[in-house]
Image (cartoon, rainbow, N blue to C red):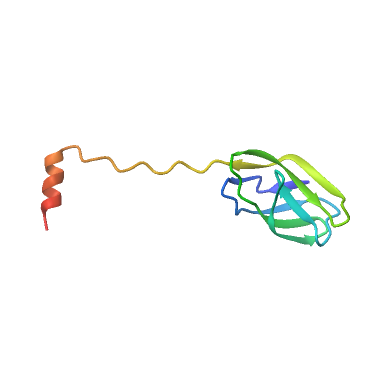
Amino acid sequence: MSVAPASGTVNGGTSIAVTGTGFVAGATLTLGGTAAVSVLVTRGTTLTAVTPARSAPGAVAVTVTNPDGQSGTRAAGYTYNPLPAPPSPPSPPSHPRAASRQAARP
């Protein structure tokens, strides 16, 4: 089984495609034990879904379970990445008087 893309942010919401064999309509997908949403088996070898959010970054197992209970797991099949750091605030002007004169202009 393979997952593409193999990573996304902890916010979830990443559309993924899982390829393998024997997927049937009604299959479920979990990432690290949490159910994915919008799971759709497009062929017996491809499943698409949207990743759930996760509280911490790291690699998780990806498990597909068919309605009859048969399942397959790929250990560390998907990696949740931390959110990017917020941008730094702008630096203050290097000369405070110049900044106050600019601010005072109408």
Residue at 59% over, 40% down: 56
Query: Horizontal and vertical percent for residue 100?
Result: 13, 46
Residue 46 is drawn in which quadrant?
A: bottom right
* 25 over 10 or under it: above or below: below
Left or right: residue 39 versus residue 43 is: left
Left or right: residue 10 versus residue 20 is: left
- Quarter in which the C terminus is drawn: bottom left
Left or right: residue 36 versus residue 56 is: right
Residue 86 is drawn in which quadrant?
A: top left
Residue at 45% over, 41% down: 85
* Front residue (pair 32, 8): 32
Residue 58 is drawn in which quadrant?
A: top right
Residue at 82% over, 62% down: 25
Left or right: residue 10 versus residue 34 is: left
* 5 over 43 or under it: above or below: above
Query: Horizontal and vertical percent for residue 73?
Result: 79, 43
